[in-house]
Amino acid sequence: MTLLGKVFTVLIFIMSLVFMTFAVAVSATHINWRTLVTNPPENTTEGAPLGLVHQLAALKEANVNLRAEMEELRNEYQREMTARRHAIGSLETKLAEVKQGLTDKEAELRALQASEGESAEALKVAQQTVAALRIEIGSLRSEIQVAQADRDKQFDRVVQLTDQYNSVQGFLKNFKERNLQLASQISDYKRVMDKVGLTPNTNVDGMPPPNLDGIVTAVGERNLIEISIGSDDGLRVGHRLEVFRSSGYLGYAVVLKTDPDRAVAQVDEKTQRGLVKVRDSVATKLSRTRAS
């Protein structure tokens, strides 16, 4: 092998390592945006969380449920407040009547005290009546305090639900903005995929690495050839390589066997346009190699 051939061999090896590094870096940073957006609940795992579309739907459903619950609590609160107002009004009326009765009884007591002709027994009965009325007033006051405390509790519940509603609205707004961003990114990715001729159903595992080229290092029987690229470069059995010399197309070969640094392929007789020789070029994309 001449010095120039050795130099080209080393350059090809170095470029193969560079392209392999780029391929590994691109593969490591790949993010499946479609899964991130539309991953269904039955496919949710630790590494693949629920899609943002389903999260947004769940939040919308939670928002509707919270609205319904808040509306129900509001109606219940209004009914409770109406009932409490009626109860408080009734209790206040009764309290006024009791106070008036107490006033009457106190006046009656003063009249009894002023009257020298009333007996001590009548005075005792009046005192007992006043004590009973005072106890009843205390009981009514306790009921009013309980009603007021319950009203305050219901009001606090309404405030809490209002805060939850506002929080859910904030989350919903953020998810809508994120959904628009992801939709824009998906649209950009789709334009790129359409430009390179890929679809979501394209099996990229069976495709040879792009822009991969090498040379024929040996020629055998039955159109078998040995090439200078192998499995370390991403080449797999069944991959198709174009064979050419300078600007002349010689046909394509299918990979039959791969080693880390070399591979064996068979030239297709139907497409063969000339005799393949050592040092002929092979590539996964003919257009790129011809352009270079």
Image: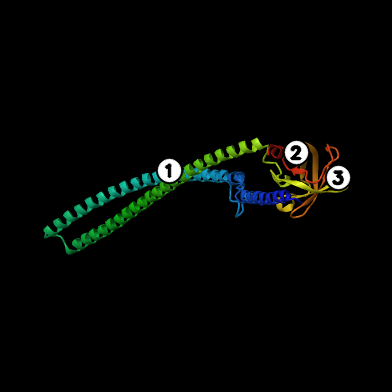
Q: Closer to the camera: disc 1 or disc 3? A: 3
Callout 1, which amino acid? Asn
Rendered image: mark on residue 118: none
Callout 2, which amino acid? Ser
Indicate the position of residue 280 as horizontal and vertical percent values: 78, 43
Residue at x-position 39% and y-position 44%: 78
Question: 10 Å neighbourhood of mark 1: few (<14), some, or many (≥20)?
Answer: few
- Which is more toward the observer, 118 or 258? 258
Spatial CA distance of label 1 from label 3 is 86 Å
Q: Are marks 1 and 3 in contact (CB under 8 Å)?
A: no
Judged left or right of residue 249, residue 288 is left
Residue at x-position 35% and y-position 47%: 84
Q: Secondary structure at mark 1?
A: helix
**Quadrant showing the C terminus:** top right
Spatial CA distance of label 2 from label 3 is 20 Å
Spatial CA distance of label 1 from label 2 is 85 Å
The residue identified by callout 1 is 75
Q: Secondary structure at mark 3?
A: loop
Indicate the position of residue 237 as horizontal and vertical percent values: 78, 49
Q: Residue 47: which quarter of the image?
A: bottom right
The residue identified by callout 2 is 246
Q: Closer to the camera: disc 2 or disc 3? A: 2
- Mark 1 / mark 2, whichever is N-terminal: 1
The correct choice, above or below, for 171 with respect to 114 in the image is above
Callout 3, which amino acid? Asn
